[in-house]
Image (cartoon, grey):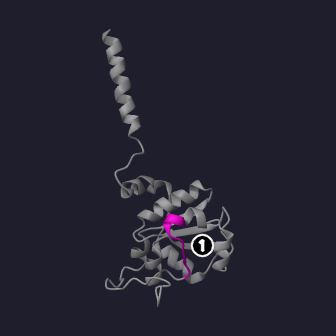
Amino acid sequence: MKKIIQLIMLLVLTGQFYSCRGIYENGGEMAADCRSDINQLSVKTLQTKIDTGGDYYLIDIRQPSDYYTSNIPGSVSIPRGILEFKIGDAGFWSEQYIYPPEKKSEIILYSSDGALGILAAKTLMQLGYTNVYNLEGGYTAFNPHQDPNAVAVTPGAGCGG
């Protein structure tokens, strides 16, 4: 009887341990856990790519108001919330005058501080994109001297709208 009770206790404890795997308190914790699975690109490497040109997609996954206020030259705005739906949308890319990325195309993502970029990169990898990078430190690392008083610009927010 004692061995049966010990076995039951062992099963209960093991079940509790494995049931908590993959549950996070917040997005930052999730991004930290996924970081080792994601290719990181340094600001220096990105700057070299920008200076020399090349064949890559640079995607700003911040909110449109952040993108229109300031962004990395050559980037395209696809907010994180719609990335999965726009990445393969030929209509979206034709509006950008660019062909849609292929599954093997080099894609560089950036967010404000890099954490959201990690999660977005993981999602693109799950969609089959094989050459995805996250900009280490995000836009803040690329442009550390941002104007803290910059007023957010919202596209289409002129007269009447």
Residue 64 % position (x, y): 48, 76
Kindly identify which residue carries mark 1: 57
Q: Residue at x 52, y 61 (%)?
A: 121
- Nearer to us in this view, 36 or 93: 93
Q: Residues within 10 Å of mark 1 (few under 14, many from 20)?
A: some
Magenta stretch holds residue 11: no
Question: Quadrant of the image for the N terminus?
Answer: top left
Quarter of the view holding residue 57: bottom right
The residue stretch that appears in magenta: 74-82
Above/below status of 131 relative to 126: below
Residue at 41 percent across and 41 percent down: it is 21
Is 66 left or right of 78, judged from the image as shown? left
Q: Nearer the viewer, residue 51 or 109?
A: 109
Measured from the top left, where is residue 77 in percent x and y?
53, 75
What is the x, y in percent for residue 43? 46, 74
Query: Residue 17's image quarter?
Result: top left
Quarter occupied by residue 70:
bottom left
Membership of 77 in magenta stretch: yes
Q: Identify which residue is drawn at 67% across, 80% down.
A: 97
- In the image shown, does 159 or 144 lie closer to the viewer? 159
Q: Is residue 157 above or below residue 130?
A: below
From this view, report whether residue 11 is shown above or below residue 130: above
- Counting from the top left corner in percent of width and height, residue 88 is at 65, 65
User: What residue do we see at 39% from left, 57% from top?
Assistant: 27
Using residue 62 as the reference point, say whether residue 84 is left or right of it.
right
Q: Amino acid at mark 1?
A: Tyr
Secondary structure under the numbered disc 1 in the rendered image: strand
Q: Relative to 98, is 159 above or below?
A: below
Q: Residue furthest top?
A: 1
Name, please, the residue furthest toward the bottom: 159
